[in-house]
Amino acid sequence: MLLLKKHLVALVRAGKKRQTIRLWDRPHVRVGQISYTPGLGKLKITGLEELPHLDALTPADAIADGFATLSELLSEIHQSYPVIPPGKRLFRVTFEWPWPPTADPITPETLLPPQSAPPRTSAAKRRPSLARNSAGPGSTPAVTANPPTRLTATAAQRAAVKSWVLSQMEENK
C-alpha cells in the first residue's frame, strides 16, 4: 500500500503527479507491483531508485512529483519529515495511474448502456384502467411488463466510479 495525503491524491487525479519521494529504512514497494492507494485505487509501481541525499533531487523531480519548483517539493518533504532520523534512506518511487490503464476515462455515464427512446405506448398500455375492455364485462386486459435491465460493471469500472465519487466528495467539503 502506498499512502498519499489528500492534496497529493488530487495531483495524481489531475495527471500532475507521477512519482513520490519517500524516506524509508528499506524499500516498501517493488517495481512491477500493483499497489493500492486510498482515494485512487490501484496503481502500478514503475520505478524505484535510491537517492544519496535530498540534494540529488532536480527540478524534473519536482515536476514529476506535481510541484512547480524544487523548493516547493523540498518544502513538502520537510513538512512530511520534519526530522530525518538516522538510518533512513531516500527513495524515488514512480508509478502509473490508473491501473489498468484505460483508453477512455470511466465516468458514471460510461457505465450505463446507451439509452434508446422508449417505445411509444398508448395510454391504455401505460394505465390498464384506461383500456377499453373489448372482451366483455368482468375481464381484465392483458398487460405485459418489460423486464428490468440489469447493469453490470467490471471491477475496474466499479473502482473508477468509487474513486470518482470520493473525489467529488472531497471537492464538496
Image (cartoon, helix red, strand yellow):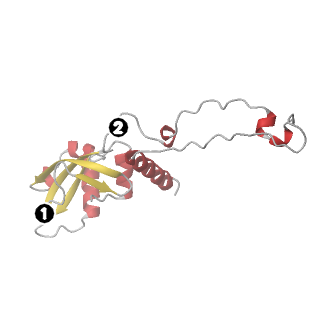
Question: Mark 2: which secondary structure?
Answer: loop
Query: In the drawing, what numbered circle is on residue 26?
Result: 1
Count up the numbered dots.
2
Q: Please, which residue is most extreme toward the right here?
A: 137
**Residue beneath label 2, please?**
102
Across and down, in percent, residue 144 comes to: 70, 39
Q: Is residue 110 left or right of residue 95?
A: right
Q: Are marks 2 and 1 in contact (CB under 8 Å)?
A: no
Image position of 131 (left or right of 36): right
Measuring from the top left, give residue 128's x and y in whole percent. 80, 41
Q: Give the SS element for disc 1.
A: loop
> Residue sitting at 25 percent across and 44 percent down?
64
**Foreground residue, 76 or 120?**
120
* Residue 113 image label: none
Up the image or down, 76 lies above or below 13; here it is: below
Q: Which residue: 89% across, 38% down? A: 136
Image x and y of residue 76, in percent: 29, 57
